[in-house]
Amino acid sequence: MSHPLTHFGRLAVVAAILALAGCASGAPPIPPDAVAAAAAAAAASQQTLADYVIGPGDGLHVFVWRNPDLTTEVRVRPDGKISIPLVNDMPAVGKTPSQLATDIEGKLAEFVRTPDVTVIVSGFGIGAFENQVRIVGAGATKPQAIPWRQGLTLLDVMIEVGLSEFAAGDRAKLVRRVNGSESETPVRLSRLVNRGDLTQNLQLLPGDVLIIPEARF
């Protein structure tokens, strides 16, 4: 199964080429540490992409080498499955792109000689259950699940979700499961949103649940 270089993979290759070119031209060469750092960043990015777990609503580009009639764009259905030419109702949720590509190859092998498939995530839905951040409670303007992303904070979530008129924002709590046990952290969302108190701007992790109650009258 072939996997084209990502932007980051190309970055590492370009860095290495520039280093060699600098030596050949007499220009100051790029320090070896810089080349190594670029390669390390590319490797880390490749690992992150390889580990991504497909979720409902994700857009997928399914590329079948030398078979343009089988190459297609598809979105993961709410039931977690996809249908592509010659392959119906293939489970996709919970798999990495490489795992899904291997499964598709197995199905296509019934019709195509030695199929070579690459799956690329071209658009993101809400993500797999364990990769979501969920906001619940009567105090949230729009209770919902949103896809977790690197660097996601409470402030990011509040900009997207908002506090209702009757929210008891300073009685909110963040529920997090760690090593099989749950922990609850009080958060003062009203101070964060209305006063700009960034001490309340916690980093969020996949699977976090933010509970925003309504004020008592």
Image (cartoon, rainbow, N blue to C red):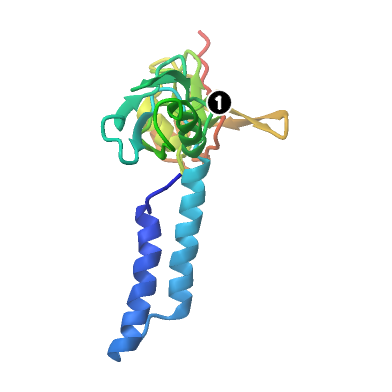
User: For the image shown, how many numbered marks are present on the structure?
Assistant: 1
| 210 lies left or right of 147 | right
Which amino acid lies under the numbered mark 1 shown in the image of this protein? Val
Residue 122, visible in the rendered structure: no
Q: Nearer the viewer, residue 168 or 110?
A: 110
Estimate the x, y position of residue 140 in percent, counting from the top left: 44, 19
Estimate the x, y position of residue 96 in percent, counting from the top left: 51, 36
Q: Which residue is mark 1?
A: 209
Residue plotted at (46% across, 35% down): 101
Quarter assignment of residue 60: top left
Tell which residue pokes out farthest to the top in this image.
217
Estimate the x, y position of residue 205 in percent, counting from the top left: 55, 37
Estimate the x, y position of residue 19 in percent, counting from the top left: 37, 79
Indicate whether 214 appears above or below 42: above
Residue plotted at (39% across, 73% down): 16
Indicate whether 24 appears above or below 210: below
Q: Nearer the viewer, residue 101 or 77?
A: 101
**SS at mark 1?**
strand
Residue plotted at (38% across, 66% down): 13
| 138 lies left or right of 60 | right
Q: Nearer the viewer, residue 142 or 186?
A: 142
Tell which residue pokes out farthest to the front in this image.
113
Indicate whether 192 appears above or below 9: above
Residue 211, visible in the rendered structure: yes
